[in-house]
Image: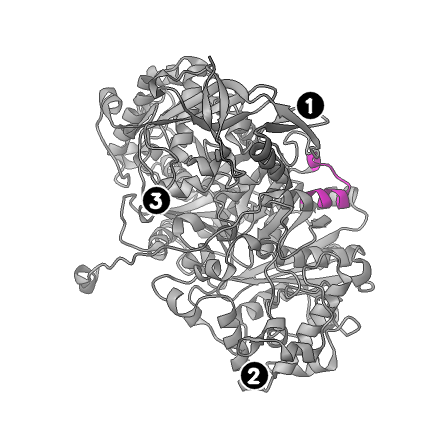
Amino acid sequence: MGKRVGIIGVGQTHHAAKRLDASGVELIAEAVTRALDDAELTIKDIDAVVIGNMDHFENINYVDMWAIDGLGAFMKPVFKVTTGGTTGTTVGACGYYQAASGLFDVVLAVGWEKNSESDTQAAIATCASPILERDAFAGAIGPLATEYSMYMKAFGATEEDSAIVAARDRNNALNNPYAHSRQAVTVEDVMNSPMLSYPIKFLDMCPRSDGSCAVIFASEEKAKKLCPKPAWVHTSVVRHDYTHFGDLEWTFMPTLERASARAYKLAGITDPLNEFDVAELYLPASTCGVKWMDSLWFCDHGGAPELIRKGTFNMDGQLPINPSGGVISTNPIGATALIRIAEGAWQIMGKSGARQIENVRKALCTGFGGCSWSDVMILGADLP
Amino acid sequence: MIYMERVAIIGVGQTKYEHGKQGNFAELVFEATSKALQDAGITRDDIDNVVTVSSDFWDGRTISSMAVSDASGAFDRDITTVEGDGTFGALYGMMRILSGSFGVTIVASHHKGSESNMNIITNTAFDPLVERKLGLDAVSSAAMQARRYMSKYGLSEEQFALVSVKNHGNAMRNPLAFLPMEITVEDVMNSRKVADPLKVLDCSPVTDGACTLILAAERQAKKLTRPAKCVWMKGVGHCSDAYRLGDRDLADTRALKDAAKRAYAMAGIDDPRRQIDVAEVYDAFSYMEPLWLEGLGICDDGKGCEYTERGYFEFGGKLPVNVSGGRLSSNPVQVAGLAGMAECVLQLRGEAEERQLDGAKVALVHGINGMCGQSHCVWILGK
Amino acid sequence: MPDWKDEVEEIIHQGKISVPYTWTVGSTLSRFYCELRDSGKIWGNRCPSCNKVFVPPKVKCIYCYKDLNDWVMLPGTGTLETYTVVRYEEPMLHPRKAPFVFGAVKMDGADTAMVHLIGDVDPEEVKVGMRVEAVLEEEREGNILDIKHFRPIG
């Protein structure tokens, strides 16, 4: 068996719509410097590096090669991983597996994006098969809007349910100095915001941001030596099961169900709603924050609206979701999923400042992207 | 450095390498992956995770992994994607097994260079804020590296040409190779000038193809397949040099030396020239073969061409290099290093048919990433 | 192979992805390009720890990972470390018609080379070790092509 691994440091930039003061390399340098400071390490302590983003957002080929200066990766082992919106969790999983393998003890994992540098929708559209689907169905909003419409029809969920989620995440962001969009909103504000693609409205949807996040993973012995309270990785599970949008089952979120079920099994979780103390979830739209609760096994299919309406996932609820403000407050795509892991880690390490939840022993982090793909990582205050 | 457990390559599958292949990305990956599963004697039920190797740029789409996830056997399996040469994908595939989370990894790479413009795509590897505007690409930058290598050690274009002659000639024994050719140094010297000192026959061709490797932890390998099929991943190292060409002496192979050192230490190799029986080295251009052989410690700095002239690296020489025909005969970019691994697996198993070298027990495979070989991955495989 | 595959017409679809870009130059290179554009001067920056001078200027020292706040004005002259005469046409990329010359110029006062065009010289006359100087465009926009090329000195 491999080694157990803990997160010993985290750094992020102050995410924004446009960071005109910082090039991509400068953004990466910021996050890496902050992560090293957080872990009280120098670049010499890093044994290997992994980086990820979505190529077409900045049009840079071989990003791992281009980013050397910002990563501090000169004469170090480095490579790149990328899987669309799930890139951040793919990067996180890679940091974890490298440290667990025994080949490298301290691994720097970096996600970043400068979405301001391109037309996000035009770039995302290129993920659809050019032969079958690109002309007809592509983009991020279409599929999400479609799935919630079907969920509303099947189970009586409402636009107001998703507006509750939107208001929750956006108000949470007020406690997070790193968040891109920090605005106090009411459910009514959300309901009145312009419609983008029925039933998703402007305030339901994530922004596109410039930002970077760096997470330092260390194998057990090193982690114990270097960090007083590492966030231990309990498990990582990925299910990227679909290539064509037309193949999807729409009334539930199949990849999230499979990924989370497997993750819970590996991590010995039988009652997720009660066993997790905090969840940082990749919800690209508030509608996902309703429908996907079923698929995380918090309730039966169709049970989510009741939980939402009861305030189960508020900061003072049974299982706080997205104290950071989540994806609808901050979305530098290549970093977004890694930020979930970063925020989950800080919650365990007790470094979440104004957004800290008390006594976090177990955190649930998820990633989403591509053709309805799901990643799950479970972190814990105790060794797995 | 102690492994928790050994990892073996138990299956390989490759498509023929050629220009203008008819299949789409998924079809190529399906072909290579099916062949690999068949070679290993296992089914998709036996694998638990997938590493795809692809490039959003060459594929002309974002999330290039999406096009091939079904075809690579990823349904209801953990999957990830490395962008870069296949040797790095194999490295990550091995680490995922060593982590203890997985037992059997599919590493599936694909590339269809014929569907795009290589110059424009490699130009995007240069900094949009600086060198990209100059119009540099893989060829013009490699040409500068070749010239630097020549002037540092007093080498000639004719010496580089020998590599092209050797590798295209070697390809005659490889039914999968794109450009098997019997050529002479004169043919290379007379081929059309591209960017001095590189001529057409000094450069690798735009190629399409796919290659899949199946890796297994020792405990799984023992259960699933016969010992004859297993080739052990004995050592690996990777390392990147600086990004800007101007930050580097282009003829200094420091990053490769570092990567090789790690790989050799892991594999217990202290005299590479004598202990390695066969090598696949990333010859994207003719001059790169002797340059990288120096970085690999097979010869001293500046001596790569001398050894080439002596026939040391010929098919019948002391240390045959690129018996598959090398990248000069087939260069499906991200696939290329993995194809080198596939060739070495066949050699070590005794399955290399016409190309078979007697008694090959230890192989070296080398892959590069980035322009002018900025980053390197070195593998030692053994029986 | 099933019969229908032998007879099917293999269709090709043409496509071009259309994603326009606006890159943020960032603080470090913005300063470099502003000086180039406005004063016609080439600046590098120096690491306080190892004293290496980089041009184009860097965000962090690649050796020490320290912030670089020491700016150094360079004379704009240097020595040609390597070059190539490009003989193929790639109109979408190349700023000049072939044959033209790319070179790496080890800049005086710095520890790095700059890659650029080598001009005002017959491509066949270019030699490694030549001393060269930057020639600036009259009208400059704040990018690397504000340097027209490097030409032989004397």
Using the image, tell me which numbered label, if any, was put on residue B117.
3
Give the residue type that dot 2 points to.
Met
**Where residue A56 sits: x, y (%)?**
48, 52
Mark 1 lies on a secondary structure that is: loop
Quarter of image, res A329 = bottom right
Magenta highlight on residue A42: yes
Judged by depth in the image, the label closer to the viewer, 2 or 3, is: 3
Q: CA distance from mark 1 to mark 2?
A: 64 Å
Pointer 1 indicates a residue of which chain?
Answer: C
Pointer 2 indicates a residue of which chain?
Answer: A
- Does residue B76 appear left or right of residue A136 in this picture? right
- Does residue A97 appear left or right of residue A54 in this picture? right
Q: Residue at x 68, y 71 (%)?
A: A270
Q: Residue at x 35, y 38 (%)?
A: B331
The number of discs equals 3
For the residue carrying disc 3, how many other residues have a C-alpha within 10 Å: few (<14), some (14-19), or many (20+)? Answer: few
- Does residue A341 appear left or right of residue B31 in this picture? right
Q: Could one spot residue B378 in this view of the protein?
A: no
Q: Residue at x 61, y 84 (%)?
A: A158
> What residue would you read off at disc 1?
C51
B160, above or below A140, in the image: above
Give the residue type that dot 3 points to.
Asn
> What residue would you read off at disc 2?
A152
Q: Which residues are magenta?
A: A32-45
Mark 2 lies on a secondary structure that is: helix
Q: Main secondary structure of the magenta part?
A: helix
Q: CA distance from mark 2 to mark 3?
A: 47 Å
